[in-house]
Image: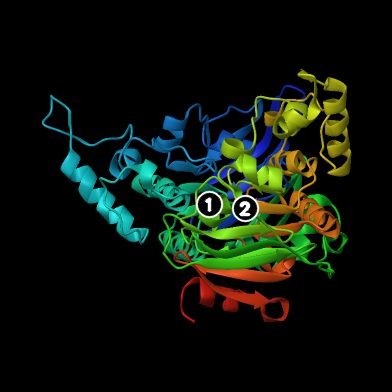
Amino acid sequence: MPHPLLTARGIHKHFPGVHAVNNVDATFHLGEVVAVIGENGAGKSTLMRIIAGVDQPDAGEIQLEGQPVTISSVSQATDLGIAFIHQELNLADNLSIAANIFLGREPKRFRPFNLIDFPTITRQTEGILSRLSLDLSPHRLVGDLSIGQQQMIEIGKALSQSARLIIMDEPTSSLTHHETRRLFSLIRELKGQGVCIVYISHRLMEVNEIADRVIVLRDGQNSGELQKDEIEHSRMVALMVGRDSTDFYQPQTRQTGAVRLQVENLVVPGLSNQPISLSLRGGEVVGMAGLVGAGRTELAESIFGIRQPVSGSISVDDQQIRINSPKDAIQAGIFLVPEDRRLHGLITAFTIRDNIALPGLGRYQMVGFIQRKTIEGVAEKMVEELSIKTTSINQELGLLSGGNQQKVAIGKWFSLQPKVLLLDEPTRGVDVMSKSEIYQLIDQLAEMGIAILAISSDLEEILRISDRVLVMHKGILAGQLNRDQLTEETIMHLATGTV
């Protein structure tokens, strides 16, 4: 029997105060898709960073095709045929697609002058874009692309390296349904060519569909392994968290109240000229589905005052309001938790206390002086009520897991007693346990009478949390589905304009 392509044995890695990877073993064979799953902090990304040469292990051995190897750098990993597609995009916005794909590996011509061979770069980039089903020019700036398109360009970089082992860390977190289907088709194509794909994801439905084998990590250690015929949601969850999946979030039947938010004939700049009308009731969770680029975020930003609507009206509790800025929306009780929490929702270098306090500083002042005791009390209350896992309200936010950062992003608005809460991708990049806790938090907010609009590209999530669903397609509101009409198929028909 041939050797595995890569074997990791007894891998250890320490960071200050944390044993991130503790005696982990893993094997990867050519022509297979191996999912590596676990909660945030389980050691998945650290193990992959070691294999990809980003970090060095404190102990343990890596073998490539049966021979011990030391992978001391990313460039060495690349030379060995290992590519790592990070969850956090690593692209240069001011460069073209072609320049990004071949950055640092540009083919040369006219030796000994070593001039960059731009025609070859362009030609090869066109071939890669065709494989990715992206109708884009190689010369287009990456900064002009959507997040989903940028994610596909990251995958294109790995394809350009002719890698034998490709590590994909949360590759579908920013992809549309169509892009995800194309990615899966590409993964199967690469698998058929003998490439090994290591697939890291919190989306267990995807793991169930695409993986040949699952390696589960918990608290930095091996928790178990599942073969193809053993892969199912409940078994994966049990290995990840040490409990049965029935202990987790179960959808609630909610009692809704009067209309809290009424949007009438809103024309959003940059979308179609067709007006959009919608309403949210107190205590109701309304999901908003649609493909990336359908206009969901733009609509939420118009309601919140980031974008100025061309026309239309917005009312809260039957009172029409004029929103010229987020400040007006906040005063009216409308709050937005943005899709990119690290870029637009939080200041990760600040403490938990300061992040929670920032939006309400005007409320925490007396004759011009900030009341620190009041702020600390509010922060302590949010940490307790939202079950934020931290050693102190004075802990730097960037040191928290993604799920706990998201709780802080919600908590800073929760502390201001919202009437309407707009959640854009509320569980993007968080693990199954944190998702469950955020779903319970959404239930808690709804029970308080808050009207919630939850934008999500995760159809499993939409189906799980929504009382009804609004679906957008190419800048228009394509339709509404009540709870008894909700299936992935009915949502996708509207999202793709086939109904």
Label 2 Cα neighbours within 10 Å, binned few <14 / some 14-19 / many ≥20: many
- Residue closest to the eye, 222 or 352: 352
Amino acid residing under circle 1: Pro
Q: CA distance from mark 1 to mark 2?
A: 8 Å
Say whether marks 1 and 2 touch (CB < 8 Å): yes
Across and down, in percent, residue 498 comes to 46, 79
419 relative to 68, above or below: below
Q: Amino acid at mark 2?
A: Ser
Q: Nearer the viewer, residue 453 or 149?
A: 453
In the structure shown, which secondary structural element does the residue marked by tag 1 occupy? loop
Marker disc for residue 201 = 2
**Residue 13 in sight:** yes
Q: Is residue 1 visible?
A: no
Q: Which mark is residue 220?
A: none
Q: Residue furthest left?
A: 110
Secondary structure beneath dot 2 equals loop
* CA neighbours of label 1 inside 10 A, class few (<14), some (14 to 19), many (20+): many
Residue 450 in percent (x, y) is at: 78, 56
Q: Residue at x 70, y 34 (%)?
A: 359
The residue identified by callout 1 is 171
Q: Residue at x 50, y 57 (%)?
A: 175
Sooner in the amino-acid sequence: mark 1 or mark 2: 1
**Residue drawn at x 34%, y 46% as measured from the top left:** 160
Relative image position of residue 83 (x, y in whole percent)? 46, 42
